[in-house]
Image (spheres, rainbow, N blue to C red):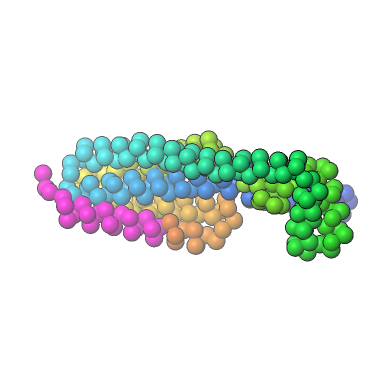
Amino acid sequence: MVVQREGRLHGHGARHLEQHRTSRVGWLRAAVLGANDGIVSTASLLVGVAAAEADHGAIMLSGAAGLVAGAMSMAAGEYVSVSSQADTEQADLARERQELADDAAAELAELTSIYVHRGLEPKLAHEVALQLTSHDALGAHARDELGITDALAARPVQAALASAAMFSIGAALPLVTASLLPASRIVVGVSLTSLLFLGALGGVSAQAGGAKLRTAILRVTVWGALAMGATALIGTLLGVSP
């Protein structure tokens, strides 16, 4: 969801709505990472096993196992890492809350100093700090001293669910492709279609995050091609014909 903020009144009283994408950072990062990892890891696994000349059933079993294991791993990894970030944020907020209770004057001076360094005149900086402190002292320090905002705050459950769901969706694409192909064509077929999937993912993420389209597409397809090429080589070198 695009963040909409009311700006100044323009023209005949109509409000100017500004659109920002920062609220998407948390879930977008987890979703793109999950989908990209799902496509790359599952496609690479399928290509590697197929290059080893395994039969179709073994190839599909390895892909399905990779999907389940990968989704659970992504969810656990995201939850643990983002929970650590959330714990750090909460510890910092608790410390700041205590400092406000112990020495409010020093905290006001610290906030004033922050605004001075950002370009405000000392008198105006003090007035801004005073008013923001009166309104929400902890919120002002969280935002301007610690860099913690609602839009960028750590959300472990959201990140874990988004990552696992997108991994599963991404992994399902090469897996479905492999199910429709004979074993002899899986290496080429899965590699090519997976690169197309990765390119589409790069385009969607660029559109959602406001990034350059070409750059986003190139970085996911190049790394995906390298991963599939490496596993195909390993499968060819170590595989044994049935």
Give how far across and how far down residue 70 sits, in percent.
Answer: 37, 40
Give how far across and how far down residue 198 sits, in percent.
Answer: 42, 52
Front-most of residues 226 and 53: 226
Above or below 117: residue 205:
above
Left or right of 135 on screen, residue 3 = left
Q: Is residue 76 visible?
A: yes
* Residue that appears at 66% across and 43% down: 95
* Residue that appears at 43% across and 49% down: 36
Left or right of 240 on screen, residue 98 = right
* Residue that appears at 47% across and 51% down: 201
Residue 210 belongs to the span the image colors magenta = no
Front-most of residues 43 and 116: 116
Q: Main secondary structure of the magenta part?
A: helix
Q: Quadrant of the N terminus?
A: top right
Front-most of residues 40 and 95: 95
Q: Is residue 180 visible?
A: no
* Residue that appears at 40% across and 36% down: 72
Front-most of residues 142 and 40: 142
Give how far across and how far down residue 124 sits, in percent.
Answer: 86, 58
Residue 224 belongs to the span the image colors magenta = yes
Q: Quadrant of the C terminus?
A: top left
Q: In this figure, what is the number of numbered marks?
A: 0
Above or below 157: residue 12:
below
Give the extent of the magenta segment: 221-242
Image quadrant of residue 110? bottom right
Left or right of 62 on screen, residue 156 = right
Give how far across and how far down residue 214 sits, in percent.
Answer: 50, 62
Image quadrant of residue 58? top left
Which residue appears farthest toward the left when viewing the image?
242
